[in-house]
Amino acid sequence: MAGMSTMTLTSTSLHTSSKPINDNDHDEDDENDNNLDLNFFQQELARRRRRDNDGGGADDGDMNDVDDDTIENAQDNITNTESEENEVSFDGYDFRDIIYSKWGECFDVDFQRVDSYGFRNVYLNIMPFRLGGRRFRHQTEYDYLCHLQAVKVEILVKYNQLEYILTQIGETTKKPRAGTSPLVAVPLRLDLTPEQVEKILG
């Protein structure tokens, strides 16, 4: 699999749709599964917010550097909790925690198409826009979590890329940087077939 490098972004190269990238061939059963998954996510978000309000949240001072166990535990959960419906115990809230544990900020994520030497690839970019920042496109934390959930459900799980992306997050030494021109994001490559790339990009 290809190595990773820091990628500079321009406004013309970035795919910045705030809506989940959907496969137009979803059947009715897939849509019902996604609705159920979102309902579960909303309930889990409410439960965790109640837990945090009761004083059970994590200490921010312990999350400046990613712990290898954080990534490994997430990967173990993916492997060990797959049900007959091929669902995994990993949601947008967990994805946010992984990003925060790695970089100390809740950075936005987005997909980018990269054409090189006649080949088309898709990267998941960790963007240099943080939750609460002036240039953060999501109005609330809930909107941000729903976006992470859509990325997880629509792309990473559907195309069996979640564990690969988590591995890259754990291994990279790069960090998103907003104070440069152009901006710098951390690119995480998706290992897809040409047919899968076309389905994602449309």
Image: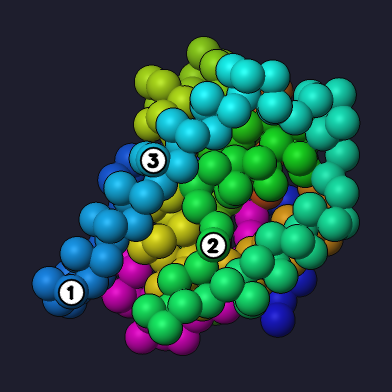
**Residue 168 visible in the picture:** no
Q: Residue furthest top?
A: 134
| Other-residue count near label 3 (Cα within 10 Å), few / some / many at <14 / 14–19 / ≥20 | few
Q: CA distance from mark 2 to mark 1?
A: 20 Å
Contact (Cβ within 8 Å) of mark 2 with mark 1:
no
Query: Considering the image in quadrants, where does the C terminus appear?
Result: bottom left
Looking at the picture, how far across and down is residue 43, in whole percent? 39, 40
Between 84 and 165, the residue placed more toward the observer is: 84
Looking at the rendering, the stretch of residues picked out in magenta corresponds to 187-202
Q: On residue 89, which mark appears?
A: 2
Which amino acid lies under the numbered mark 2 shown in the image of this protein?
A: Ser
Looking at the picture, how far across and down is residue 128, in whole percent? 62, 33
Query: Considering the image in quadrants, where does the N terminus appear?
Result: bottom right
Between 150 and 112, the residue placed more toward the observer is: 150
Say if the magenta span includes residue 191: yes
Contact (Cβ within 8 Å) of mark 3 with mark 1:
no
Which amino acid lies under the numbered mark 1 shown in the image of this protein?
A: Asp
Q: Secondary structure at mark 3?
A: helix
Q: Which residue is mark 3?
A: 43
Q: On residue 29, which mark appears?
A: 1
Vertical arrangement, residue 37 with respect to residue 132, above or below: below
Q: Secondary structure at mark 1?
A: helix
Which amino acid lies under the numbered mark 3 shown in the image of this protein?
A: Gln
